[in-house]
Amino acid sequence: KNKDTLIENKYQSIEFDELTNIFTIEVTGKYGIANIDGDIVLDTAYDSIQIQGTNIYGLKDGESLEFDINGNQKDFNDNYKLITVPTDTQDYNIIVKIDDSGTRYGVADSNGNIVIECEYSYIERLMGDYFVVYDLAYKVGILNSANETVLDFNYSLIQKVDDTNLVQAFILDDSTIEVYSNNMEKIYSAKNTRITVRDRYVKLYSENDLLY
């Protein structure tokens, strides 16, 4: 972009991974990793390199080695795999861990750091630093990027109200709907509520309540 040389012109091939912002580099059939600043993270000493999510897998002398995107070696575990699913922001990715016990979801930040461990049945980004999380019993709550519980796992469904910054949380057992602001402050709660979105206001109404 600024015409600066990030990677020296001495490699037979260079491939860029947009998710992790790292380069796979090759010299005469040996592979390594460089970061976006041009620093060599892994020397070109590996027979092959694969990037899966925020993990790097290198094969050297018949041995498989696992690293994070900063080149730190990890305990290799071939009994599971990680899949990275982008969200609607570059700040976070959903991490899916698949092993013999099933599929679990977590969250990583843009640097590949796990901010919510892969311990949940399903996760999706809600807004800002908030995530809709399904526990192993498929009860739904909200966690933030500090792995703190914002809404307890008491709900059947949580979602944004279309075309607003409001969040609606459903308890199907008693038909309760709760509405929260984008700061997760409760602003409304009632049974059998309907929500209507207009250009300049949101109408919340039930048999006994009406709120604009």
Image (spheres, rainbow, N blue to C red):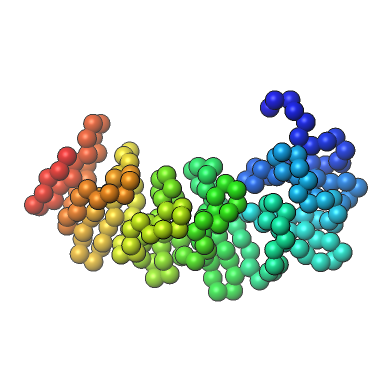
Residue under the point 52% across and 62% down: 117
Q: Quadrant of the N terminus?
A: top right
Counting the numbered discs, the total is: 0
Residue under the point 76% across and 34% down: 6
Taking depth in this image into account, of 26 and 149 the one nearest to the observer is 149
Snapshot quadrant of residue 57:
bottom right
> As drawn, which residue projects farthest toward the bottom?
101
Q: Residue 68, position in %: x, y?
A: 68, 56
> As drawn, which residue projects farthest toward the top?
3
In this rendering, the answer to whether 163 lies above or below 42 is: above
Residue under the point 39% across and 70% down: 137
Q: Residue 86, position in %: x, y?
A: 54, 48
Taking depth in this image into account, of 56 and 41 the one nearest to the observer is 41
Taking depth in this image into account, of 46 and 147 the one nearest to the observer is 147
In this rendering, the answer to whether 95 lies above or below 102 is: above
Residue 13 showing in the rendered view: yes
**Left or right of residue 143, residue 19 in this image:** right
Residue under the point 87% across and 41% down: 12
Q: Residue 17, position in %: x, y?
A: 68, 44
Snapshot quadrant of residue 76:
bottom right
Q: Quadrant of the C terminus?
A: top left
> As drawn, which residue projects farthest toward the left?
208
**Left or right of residue 196, residue 163 in this image:** right
Snapshot quadrant of residue 82:
bottom right
Q: Residue 69, position in %: x, y?
A: 68, 52
Residue 124 showing in the rendered view: no
